[in-house]
């Protein structure tokens, strides 16, 4: 009979040990579950931040492209101005274009006459 009591006592000790192990495993599972939830939240936040950064990058690249186009156009304009003959950049004398000179002179006369009245 003493042997049966010893076996029963040993089995109870094993049951307690297993129950303690199960309790520790459940605590670890709960902690892991909470850590996973936090990680999911952080991942979502990081995906949103990445999305915002990609939008900003796209806008910046577009702006840079527009600036490069403007600089190229400015460079072409500067090159064309530098390559233009000196005659083309000088003022044109109205006497060389009689019809235009008469038109301008006629307006001056009309303007001057209106001021006197």
Image (cartoon, rainbow, N blue to C red):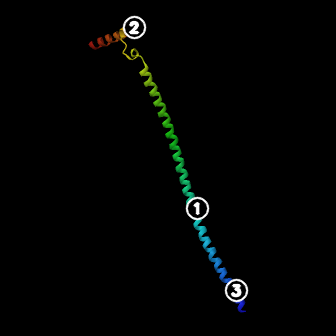
Q: Earlier in the sequence, mark 2 or mark 1?
A: 1
3D distance between C-alphas at marks 2 and 3:
128 Å
Whether residue 98 is situated above or below residue 2 in the rendered picture: above
Tell me the residue that label 1 is attached to: 36
* Residue most extreme to the top: 98
Secondary structure beneath disc 2? Answer: helix
Q: Residue at x 52, y 44 (%)?
A: 55
3D distance between C-alphas at marks 2 and 1:
87 Å
Tell me the residue that label 3 is attached to: 8
Front residue of this view, candidates 103 and 67: 67
Tell me the residue that label 2 is attached to: 99
Task: Answer with left or right where residue 3 lies relative to residue 43.
Answer: right
Front residue of this view, candidates 60 and 41: 60
Front residue of this view, candidates 76 and 45: 76
Q: Where on the picture, by quarter, is residue 115?
A: top left
- Residue 72 point in image, percent of width and height: 47, 29
| Between marks 2 and 1 in the image, the one whose residue lies nearer the viewer | 1
Secondary structure beneath disc 1? Answer: helix
Secondary structure beneath disc 3? Answer: helix
């Amino acid at each position: 009979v003493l042997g049966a009591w010893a076996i029963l006592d040993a089995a109870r000790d094993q049951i307690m040990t297993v129950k303690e192990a199960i309790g520790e495993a459940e605590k670890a599972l709960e902690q892991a579950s909470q850590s996973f939830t936090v990680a999911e939240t952080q991942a979502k936040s990081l995906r949103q931040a990445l999305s915002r950064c990609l939008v900003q990058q796209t806008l910046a690249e577009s702006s840079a492209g527009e600036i490069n186009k403007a600089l190229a156009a400015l460079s072409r304009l500067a090159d064309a101005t530098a390559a233009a003959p000196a005659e083309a950049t000088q003022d044109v004398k109205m006497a060389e274009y009689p019809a235009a000179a008469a038109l301008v002179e006629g307006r001056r006369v009309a303007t001057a006459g209106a001021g006197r009245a």
